[in-house]
Image (cartoon, rainbow, N blue to C red):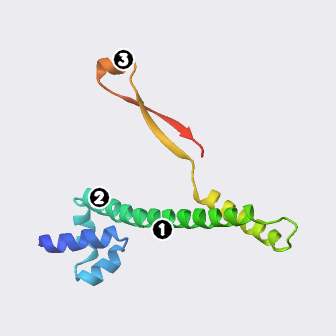
Amino acid sequence: MITQEQKDRFIELRAKGLSFEKISKDMDISKPTLIKISRGLTEQIKNLKAVELEAIQEKFFLLKKQRIEAFGEQLEKIKAELENRDFSDISTDKLLDYFQKYYQNLTEETKELVFSVYEESKIDELLGVPMVSKISWKP
């Protein structure tokens, strides 16, 4: 019989995407036994996968936020410098090129924002079921 500790370890390894074969070798439990117990642990494995994915997405979002802030800061500095420049100066071309590149990077990093708005029709009010509709906003 498999202990709760072994089940927890199995759930962790499956959530990380390891195959039954690798888990079998790691835990020294037969592959057919692991397949059999996996049927009762499907929801727990899915939930742990979702938690791990959420952590990765959160980390990525923070990195993306930092990139957007950095591009924005550089864009503001270049813009301020351009306002003080005479466009007959040859290095202005390069500065304009930098402005365009940072502006393009900033644009690529920002996505279309989507807001959810709850609208309730009379039927939905009677049933108590809110209906969600999407409203898009482009920066």
Mark 1 vs 3, N-terminal side:
1
Q: Looking at this view, is 55 or 26 the one in front?
A: 55
Q: Which amino acid does label 1 sit on?
A: Leu
Residue 2: in sight, yes or no?
no
**Which residue: 37% across, 16% down?**
122
**Which residue: 28% across, 79% down?**
24
Residue 123 point in image, percent of width and height: 36, 17
Residue 21 point in image, percent of width and height: 34, 78
**Which residue: 58% across, 65% down?**
73
Q: Which amino acid does label 2 sit on?
A: Asn
**Which residue: 55% across, 39% down?**
136
Label number found at residue 47: 2
CB under 8 Å between discs 2 and 1? no
Residue 139: in sight, yes or no?
yes
Q: Which amino acid does label 3 sit on?
A: Ile
Instruction: Please determine whether, in this image, residue 124 is positioned above or below residue 43.
Output: above
How far is disc 3 from disc 2 in space, using C-alphas? 34 Å
| 116 to the left or right of 5 | right
Give the residue number, with chain letter if any, for mark 1: 63
Q: Is mark 2 on a helix, strand or loop?
A: helix
Q: In which quarter of the image is the N terminus?
A: bottom left
Q: Looking at this view, is 14 or 82 the one in front?
A: 82
Label number found at residue 123: 3
Residue 108 point in image, percent of width and height: 63, 59
| 73 to the left or right of 124 | right
Residue 138 occupies quadrant:
top right
Residue 91 occupies quadrant:
bottom right
How far is disc 1 from disc 3 in space, using C-alphas? 44 Å
